Image (spheres, rainbow, N blue to C red):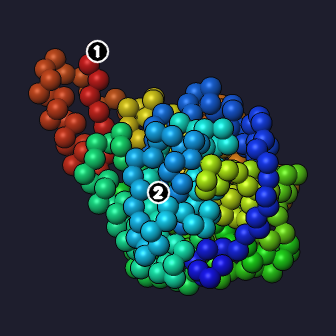
Amino acid sequence: MANTYLFPYEIQEVTPQSGIPWNVQQVNAPSFWQRTKGDGAVVAIIDTGLDVNHPEFAGRVISYQNFTSDASLDSDGHGTHVAGIIAGKTVGVAPECRLMALKALGNGMGAFSIENAFKYILDYNEKVPEQDRVVAVNCSWGGPYNPIHHYLIRRLIHSGVAVIVAAGNAGDGKPETEEIFSWPGFLYEVITTGATNKDGQPAGYSSSYDGIDIGAPGTEIYSAWPGGGYKLLSGTSMATPHVTAAYALIAAAFKQREGRYPTVDEGEEILFKHIRQTGADPRFIGKGLLDLTFDFKRWPLYRVQTGAYYYKQGAEITSQKLKDAGFNTYIVKY
């Protein structure tokens, strides 16, 4: 690829397939669908664009923004494929979440365009009601360290947006040779994703280092392609959207129960309980392989009773004091 911000990846032509793709089944997404398939949670994708007319996304693209000089929806295809893994009607992990497509890659303007995409999410979230806020952003790309990007990533996370990124495709299959030159994958603040094969073991191309948080399928992933088609792609770019979609499912289920979306700390705590061990070195897949089998034991919930009042005014005063002190609180009428 001419654009150094996109990780290299392998493309294979493919005919349409039927049934749930192997990768969606491997992360046990159908188990979670018994609870929610996304419930309209909004995910942003910073990539090469999106074929908004593809039937996989009909009616669920809430915004398409182009920060490049390329007027096409997605001439590369990478962004459409990533979006399909996240929210495709038949190929996605979270088939009922909504998408914000931010075209920032593909014309050599990656760093500046990505900066504008981050700023767009921050500005958008300040203007919309909570149910329309972006809960996670998918970043299936990498490049040189950028302090402005780092600052904006921290702002996004602090504002409640999880940032999920690719580990990189510079691996040699050996965990002891760490391929650390991967931005923003090596950041502590983000959720960094390594790629696995169909057998659940690390893919040889997947970069290895101690900053990787979780593993997900990345090899020969069947997903959408511009023009209404489908292709098989391989890379950590394909692993990352599995985790982004998983976070969207968790956020949607959390909102069902709590009436609000989780903070990033709360979301990560639940996400990292949705894993299974494979024996692979953690420098490839971090805490383990993504596993969306729904189990209430993975959903901690702690409540603190601070007092009861005969009058609404007393409850509101106490609630405001708690909020001013930095606590998440709400009023319950008995």
Q: Label 1: which residue? A: 334
Q: Is residue 301 visible?
A: no
Report the residue at 64% width, 33% height from top: 32
Outermost residue toward the top in this view: 334
- Please tell me which residue is depicted at 29% across the width and 50% down the height of the picture: 326
Q: Position of residue 263 (x, y in %)?
A: 42, 49
Q: Amino acid at mark 2?
A: Ala
Three-letter residue code for mark 1: Tyr
Q: Nearer the viewer, mark 1 or mark 2?
A: 2
Task: Pinpoint residue 174: horizontal percent, then vertical percent.
Answer: 86, 75
257 and 43: which is toward the camera? 43
Residue denoted by label 2: 101
Sequence-wise first label, 1 or 2: 2
Q: Residue at x 58, y 27 (%)?
A: 35
Q: Is residue 88 left or right of residue 326?
A: right
Q: Position of residue 30 (x, y in %)?
A: 69, 32
Confirm whether residue 109 shows in the render.
yes
Q: Nearer the viewer, residue 241 or 334?
A: 241
Whether pointer 1 and pointer 2 mark residues with C-beta atoms closer than 8 Å, the reply is: no
**Relative to the observer, which residue lies in front, 325 or 208?**
208
